[in-house]
Amino acid sequence: MSPAHHHAPTAPLLEVAGLRVAYRTRRGHVEAVRGVDLAVARGGVTAVVGESGSGKSSAAQAVIGLLADNGAVTGGTIALTGTDGRRQELVGLPERDWRQLRGTRIGLIPQDPTSSLDPVRTIGASVADPLRIHGWRDRDRIDARVLELLERVGLDDPAARARQYPHELSGGMRQRVLIAAALALEPELLIADEPTSALDVTVQATVLDLIDELREATGAGVLLITHDLAVAADRADTLVVMRAGRVEESGPTGQVLAAPSADYTRTLLADAPSLRRVVERAPRLSSTDETPLVTVHGLRQEFAGRGGRTPFVAVEDLSFEIPRGTTHALVGESGSGKTTTGRAIAGFRVPTAGSILVDGTEVTQLGGKRLREFRSTVQLVHQNPFGSLDPRQSIAQILEEPLRNTRRGSRAERRSAALHHLELVSLPPEVASRRPRELSGGQRQRVAIARALILQPDVVVLDEAVSALDVTVQAQILRLLASLQDELGLTYVFISHDLAVVRQVADTVSVLRRGVQVESGAVERVLEDPRHDYTRQLLAAIPGSGGTRPGDPGIDHEELTAS
């Protein structure tokens, strides 16, 4: 969303002043938004940036009157000014008036394209909803508008797409459908709540470009909610940094990034992987002829086709080596074969063809007891720690379980190992008695790492292990992984779609596209001098990597984060 330069009416399109939002909980009233001021200019982009729990989404939900049932605006004003200069106060608006306003004057692009579309209704029916709600009755007119909208958001063959169901579309396509629905009645204000956080980096760039083009074409203002400072740096002309319900600082994006006044903003800038300087670290690749710890050769993985269809090839003829104590990254978009490869290395999937050697053991030949014993050599850490931790167990029980399953140690020794591994991942001992739901996302990911390490593996496969985390927490986990690698001599297989993170952590990299390795080698070489168009495309799509933003007086991201 390149910043807009429109001659707007004197009053901003949206003006939020002194906004307070509280939620009723069993612990009493919890204040999520504490006196927030922000504005969106007509045709402009205001980004609200902050970690989980900063109150940014609550502020956005208050603007469109969609707070959870237990939430309420307890103070402040939210005003929308029309093209005619008439100002409408939104706080205290009756639900009937909100229903008139939503869709026509304010549109919402929600975060998760998977849960936001009704799985049993066609794409066309979902896009037509706002039109029907606002009184459109002519079936032909509705159908024509739906096709026009699907075409406008860049979906091929709109008529065929309109008849499909959400599960038949990719994540990026589903997000385009949500944008089409939000734009159906050409609202003046678009609220984009983390609109790309669930998408691959190249799809993310395409979706943000699309919102940009539509904003320029319609003159709508955009309130962009994001935890990704790099996205905000690329796309917004005004930046609002929130923390714990308050605004830490705000102003023109270029100004805030070039000279942040708040310590918190400086921390966010330092932690944002694509805005920070590449940390110079000594390469861990040894020049000796030492045998690699992991050797993958000619790996092929097919999945049987349904109903007599030809098999789907997920990975084709993949080969790479990983020296002991180093990190090898597998990079690519969804469906590139990264996770399939990681699971094969960990012994969870027998490949169709090829060889996987880990410390001289041929993993593809293992079965029964030998496979169970091997599992402690290679451990897997998943993307979503909440889904992989048993909600009924305490953290101590979760950590002790691998030891119980492999019949290691006495009860006292297992408890001692659990406490030692909590300390190893920088968690206090009192966490041992808690349940997963009582921990933050970052703490849960630390527990998942501790559980993987308790069997003292040689290799840890990290499958998108930081992609669901806020930038500051992500930076903490990456620092933790680096220190554990140095301390314990671990070898990592780091699966990611994010080249900015890979640049920080990996020694070598394989770039995968649709199951084929298009490029591999030392990270510095591949990222500084990519030989394949696809690698160049992935690099160009990294938010915050584009140097200057349009309309900005030459911001040097390296310089502004060096201080």
Image: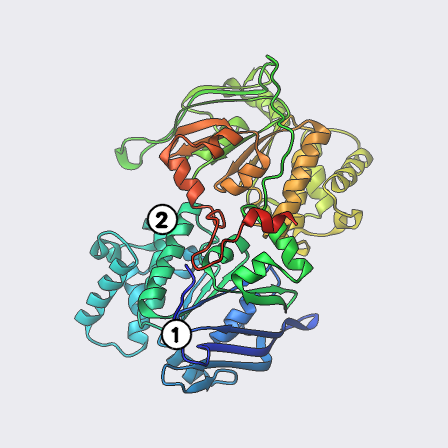
Distance Cα–Cα, label 2 vs label 1: 38 Å
Secondary structure at numbered mark 1: loop
Q: Nearer the viewer, mark 2 or mark 1?
A: 1
Query: Where residue 144 sits in the image (x, y, percent)?
Result: 19, 66
Asked where in the image residue 307 lies, by quadrant, the reply is: top left
Q: Amino acid at mark 2?
A: Ser
Residue neighbourhood size for the residue with mark 1, other residues' Cα within 10 Å, grouped as few (<14), some (14–19), many (≥20)? few
Query: Where residue 475 sits in the image (x, y, percent)?
Result: 63, 46
Picture layout, residue 524 above or below residue 384? above
Query: Where residue 351 sits in the image (x, y, percent)?
Result: 44, 25
Using the image, tell me which numbered label, if any, was put on residue 170. Answer: 2
Q: Nearer the viewer, residue 466 or 4?
A: 4
> Which residue sits furthest front?
553
Q: Is residue 462 left or right of residue 115?
A: right
> Which residue sits furthest right?
412
Whether tag 2 and tag 1 are in contact, CB under 8 A, the answer is no
Residue neighbourhood size for the residue with mark 2, other residues' Cα within 10 Å, grouped as few (<14), some (14–19), many (≥20)? some
Asked where in the image residue 96 lies, by quadrant, the reply is: bottom left
Q: Is residue 165 visible?
A: yes
Q: Is residue 521 left or right of residue 188?
A: right
Q: Is residue 522 left or right of residue 406?
A: left
* Residue on which the image places disc 1: 7
Q: Amino acid at mark 1?
A: His
The residue drawn where x is 68% and y is 40% is 480
Q: How many marks?
A: 2
Query: Where residue 346 sits in the image (x, y, percent)?
Result: 55, 28
Using the image, tell me which numbered label, if any, was put on residue 529. Answer: none
> Which residue sits furthest top?
289
> Which residue sits furthest bottom?
86
Is tag 2's residue or tag 1's residue first in the polypeptide sequence? Answer: 1
